[in-house]
Amino acid sequence: MSMAVGKPRVFVEKSKKCVSKLWKLFPHVFLILSLIGYAVFGAVLFSYIEGSSASTTEREYHAFLGELVREIQNYTGNSSSNFTQEQDLVKHLENEIPKRFKSIWLQRPDNWTFFGSLFFCCTVFTTVGPRKRSWLRRANVSY
């Protein structure tokens, strides 16, 4: 009879140890799963918002390039030699391109695939870390 009573005690003690180990492991597993879920949700959201937007910037960019080509083809400087004409054209384009170029033309919706968006999300939450000033940390986390 003492053996019958002893087995349940051992089983109860082992189950308590198992539960305590699982309870210690649970926060870590939950944190990892929540980060994965957060990244996947953000990737779906970003790929939908950024990747599916119909962009008019591509037409504007091609129009800008067409204007540059026309300027190069039609450029006639007041100088007599070809070398100085080329230098004048280069100086003219160096002044005009920064004025008329828009950096948004380099942002294309086809870059926002699911995996590109997933990379962006992972980059965001791995760069958010402790800062020396608490207001800076809160601003970084809220971003």
Image: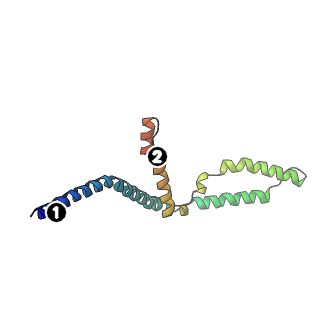
Badge 1 element:
helix
In which image quadrant can residue 108 be found? bottom right
How many neighbours does mark 2 have within 10 angstroms: few (below 14), some (14-19), or many (20 or more)?
some
Work out which residue is located at the far top of the displayed protein and give it. 133
CB within 8 Å, label 1 to label 2: no
Res 53 visible: no
**Kind of residue sitting beneath label 2:** Val
100 sits to left or right of 27: right
Please indicate whether residue 74 sits to the left or right of residue 10 in the image: right
Number of numbered markers:
2
Instruction: Say which of 123 and 55 sits in front.
Output: 123
Q: Amino acid at mark 1?
A: Lys
130, above or below 56, in the image: above
Residue that mark 2 sits on: 128
Q: Residue at x 51, y 60 (%)?
A: 116
Q: Is residue 59 visible?
A: yes
Q: What is the x, y in percent for residue 52?
A: 49, 63
Outermost residue, front direction? 2
Between marks 1 and 2 in the image, the one whose residue lies nearer the viewer = 1
Residue behind mark 1: 7
Above or below for 81 versus 3: above
What x and y, as percent, mark residue 38?
40, 56
The Cα atoms of the two marked residues, 1 and 2, are separated by 51 Å
Front one among 4 and 141: 4
Residue at the far left in the pictured view: 1
Circle nearer the N terminus (1, 2):
1
Q: Is residue 59 left or right of residue 38?
A: right
Q: Pointer 1: residues within 10 angstroms few (<14), some, or many (20+)?
A: few
Give the residue displayed 78% in from the left and 60% down from the top.
73
**Tell me, what colour scheme is on the image?**
rainbow
- Disc 2 on helix, strand or loop? loop
* Residue 120 x %, y %: 50, 55
